[in-house]
Amino acid sequence: MSQSDESLSPAVSSDGFSTFAEAKFSLDATLSSYQELNADDDTKKLLETCFKYFPPDGQVNLSEDVCGCRNDNELRQLAAWIDTGLLRPLLSKGGKTAAITTSPHSGFHDSVENLLSLDFPPASRNNQERLRRNCLKRDGYRCAISKTWSSGHDFPSGESSGILQAVHIIPFALGSFTSDDERQHTSEVWANIFRYFPALSATLNISPEDVNREDNMMAMITPLHEEFGQFHFALEATQTPNRYRLKRFPRFGSVYTFLLPHDGIVTLTSYDPNCHLPEPRYLQLHAAIGNILHASGRAEKIEELIRDLGETGSLTLSKDGSTNVAR
């Protein structure tokens, strides 16, 4: 029997971990004995990076999943499940990149089946026009990041303007499907989201069909929308509500630097009391995925994979649901 097939530390009890410290200690202890297959095996790095950037309740769940793996092969399977069932779908804006690797834990399959049993409908575009008008009005007819005015609305003389889009924080395509296979794929992605970002389900009660909502949208000028969708920058929460620190990642297009706030701070303000500002936990999800993609080195690999799939035509990536709100 190879080292990879030998049992690792015992699985955690069903009671789980009571503190972050316990979760961190157990995860580190399990991964310390992991043996890489080769120089390209970054399983350990990916799992450690995910733990670093997941929210506290997601960290506890990840530690339970890691410690529940019986051998190195299952650890690699868990890392592949997170990569194909969370990172790739979000970076591809909800489009399919490849089949999602099977999880080593039966509990994940139960979660997927539970979602499928809800028979949730696909996200609807019926209210798209109203939503984009509300988003634009709430954000004061300005880009939430650059404060550029919408060229499709009256703006002060001498001020810069441009085409704005209503950008989904959680991609619209993660709630859009047209077949049973796509519904299965969508459910698997959401099972991962709910596992590692539990507040989205437990507190906000969001479900796949209602990603098309005002608190999941922001007005952005077109170039920044593209950079945001590719996780080239993210908004990280500060101690002040609705005040965020903009974090640029290495692949951010330097030509667009002039569009970013000089002090690196983005303050979200609602100009319509009837419209909710972007939900902080949606932005937390986006920022966590961005940090994981870049700190683990997976961003470039996945972007290359998506390009290759697009060039070969073997998979058609779904649109992200952005809508032009400059009209």
Image: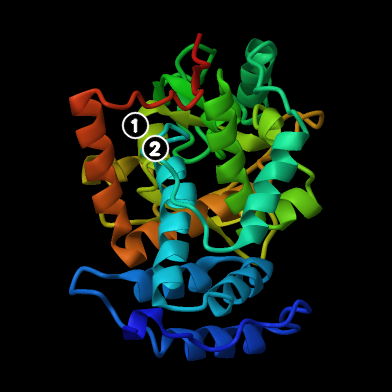
Residue in the picture at 54% in, 13% down? 154
Which residue is nearer to you in this view: 216 or 22? 22
Q: Secondary structure at mark 1?
A: helix
Q: Secondary structure at mark 2?
A: loop
Whether residue 324 appears in this view of the structure is yes
Residue in the picture at 52% in, 63% down? 104
Numbered label attached to residue 92: 2
Residue in the picture at 52% in, 72% down? 51
Q: Is residue 189 left or right of residue 203?
A: left
Q: Is residue 182 positioned above or below 236 on the image?
A: above
Give the amino acid at mark 1. Pro
Whether residue 246 appears in this view of the structure is no
Nearer the viewer's eye, disc 1 or disc 2? 2
Which residue is nearer to you in this view: 179 or 200? 179
Q: Specify the quadrant of the image occupied by residue 92.
A: top left
Numbered label attached to residue 45: none
Q: Specify the quadrant of the image occupied by residue 132.
A: top right
Badges 1 and 2: C-beta atoms under 8 Å apart? Answer: no
Give the amino acid at mark 2. Ser
Which tag, 1 or 2, sits closer to the chain's start? 2
In space, the residues marked 1 and 2 are separated at their CA atoms by 17 Å
Circle 2 residues within 10 Å: few <14, some 14–19, many ≥20? many
Which residue is nearer to you in this view: 205 or 134? 205
Numbered label attached to residue 223: 1
Quarter of the image containing the N terminus? bottom left
